[in-house]
Image: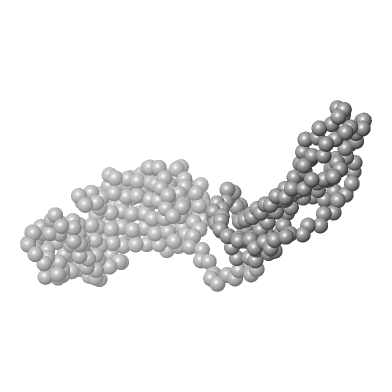
Amino acid sequence: MVGACLILSSCKSKAPTVPSFVFLPSPTPGSPSSTLVPTNTPVVTAPTATWTHTFTAVAPTATPTSDPGTPTNTFTQAISPGTPTPSPTATATFTAPAFTVTPIFTSPDTLTPTITLSPTVSPTRTPTRTPTITSTFTITGTPTWTGTPTNTFTPVPSGIYWERAYVSKNVAGTPSAFLYLAVNGLPTSSAAVTLTWGANSAPLTFNGAITITGTAYGVYRQDTITYQAGTTYVLTVNCSAGTAVGTCLAPGGITTATDGSTTSWLTNGNQGAQVQVQGPSPATTTTYFTGSATTPWTIPTSTAYPTTGTYQVWTSVDSTVYGGSGITNSPSQSYFVVRDDLYQNVVK
């Protein structure tokens, strides 16, 4: 905001012939003045009265980009009655009556105010409150399913389910047997499991539980058996759901040539043979070969042994039977594997 003020003053003297009282209007008409009421009849020597005219031009409020408007003249008149010399001494009492004065002022001079506008730049306000934003979400559409979910869970078959049963050898050539068993979808620890082969027999004892794809199975195991190729192995399970019996002929009797060129076995299996060559030591490169179960089986030496070193050759021949045919009183998903494995080192 910018304000401008111009004050013009003039003085004139005049001697009144009789005492008089002049009411001085203030800038706001209607303000009270005073009346002199004498309490006796004094003899007053007429004083010299002095009028002072003050002219104040006030510029209108304006911003740097607006019209300053028309100046307003404000006049203030003051009267000095002088110092009376009464004889005798008089006491004057003034009573202020209520009256309204409408002054008419005529300026003897033409006022041309000079207005200088100095803009004041207000600083940029910094908000002291952090607004709170409340969002309302409205769903205007109906979602459409574009795919059909696929249930990959396979329920556990009811009955005496053999998730897997194996008779096989480890790397050292030691045979063992194990069975993962569920009875009506639940693991059981009370089944009687027996493995027989030729004149031999050994129990598979409960060895805790194992979980596969969310389903728990009872584990039965026996590590003290012998492996005889050409012999029939029979696995029998007696439990609360009845008796299930699996019968499988043992393939194998494997021999691998010392130079690693061929591998052969005495009894064929009903599955394909597999040969794995790993090395040279200590490298872990592995080459796989598969073929029919016909013996003997030739190993492609140029591919299996590309450089000098020590290689490990693993030969596996197996037979597998399934529930309903090879395993009685058991779901078709059950299976029983009898497998011969031979691990042999070959130096090139």
> Going by the image, does 74 lie left or right of 291?
right
Residue 235, image x and y in percent?
37, 52
- All told, the count of numbered labels is 0
Q: Nearer the viewer, residue 311 or 92?
A: 92
- Which residue is painted at 15% across and 57% down in the image? 283
Residue 221, image x and y in percent?
35, 46
- Which residue is painted at 46% across and 42% down in the image? 190
Residue farthest along the top direction in this orientation: 89
Task: Using the image, determine if residue 343 lies above or below residue 33.
Answer: below
> Going by the image, does 75 lie left or right of 171?
right
Q: Nearer the viewer, residue 285 or 64?
A: 64
Q: Nearer the viewer, residue 322 or 229?
A: 322
**Residue 242 shows in the view:** no
> Going by the image, does 286 lie left or right of 9?
left
- Which residue is painted at 86% across and 29% down in the image? 87
Specify the quadrant that holds the N terminus.
bottom right
Residue 233, image x and y in percent?
32, 55
Residue 339, image x and y in percent?
28, 58
